[in-house]
Image: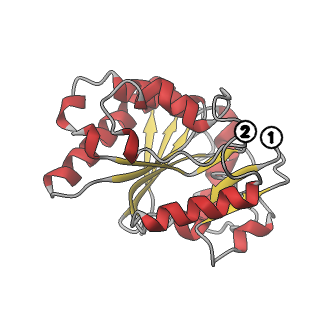
Amino acid sequence: MPADVRRCPSAQDLAEQVAAAFVAALADAQQQDRVPSVALTGGTIARTIHETVAASTDAHLVDWSRVDVWFGDERFLPADDPDRNARQAAEALLDRLPFDPARIHPMPASDGPHPSVDEAATAYGEELRAHGGDRFDVVMLSLGPDGHVASLFPGHPRLDVHDAVAVAVTDSPKPPPERVSLTLDALNRTREVWFLVSGSGKADAAAIALSGTADVHDAPSAGVRGQERTVWFLDEDAAARL
């Protein structure tokens, strides 16, 4: 199924569109008597989206205590490090709405009970399986200028892992070098994938991923699709090459 490409006039408009869609998707799932499960991402536009959701006048439509929150990837840093996606999400969204802490599942931190990034990845995969997380409702993903998603980078051998939910990345080309990431297979076990793309620096990567001819080893973003829908939210700068 072709991707649903939504061009937004600005980054703020992108954030408002995604926030509205996020609230609507969770409310719809709960109306169907399901506990929605989502995987969040990090980055500047993700923070803006999280803040917009937290401030939404429609936030009351969702029972936030009945939402399972996971993460697509994480930097293997101490839990209170400001560069961790979970820390950023907590500040912008999770601490500002009545989420149930027991339903928030951050990836292990380097100062936690799992001393190595390999053990952290294994533990997160086991946690996801233990909670029945075999299918997300929404996976949100940022896009790197090189076409990477989560912490799956072009040419990385972890792109070909099919027997794990989460993998350790020990040589990330972006600092820090150690990260935990869901695999492509795990990211694809979702009803909807939403790409959140802002800025001219992402324009080439977005065009390549949406070309329909990209190899996943060159553009990992081309390998992630929702089972029901794949939506690309792009501001005008990011959509310049389409």
The quarter holding residue 94 reads: top left
Q: Position of residue 123 (x, y in %)?
A: 61, 61
Q: Where is residue 231 in the image (x, y as percent from the top left)?
A: 43, 52
Q: Where is residue 64 in the image (x, y as percent from the top left)?
A: 28, 38
Residue type for callout 1: Pro
Residue at screen point 44% across, 30% down = 50
Q: Mark 1 points at which residue?
A: 176
Residue type for callout 2: Leu
Which is more foreground, mark 2 or mark 1?
2
Left or right: residue 238 compared with residue 77? left
Left or right: residue 101 compared with residue 112? left
Residue in front for this viewpoint, 220 or 129: 129
Residue at screen point 58% across, 68% down = 165
Mark closer to the chain start, 2 or 1: 2
SS for tag 1? loop
SS for tag 2? loop
> What label sits on residue 77 in the rendered view?
2
Residue at screen point 62% across, 50% down = 73
Tell me whether circle 2 and circle 1 mark residues in contact (CB < 8 Å). yes
- Dot 1, how many residues are within 10 Å of its Cα: few (below 14), some (14-19), or many (20+)? few
| Whether residue 168 is situated above or below residue 66 in the rendered picture | below
Q: Is residue 116 visible?
A: yes
> What label sits on residue 89 in the rendered view?
none
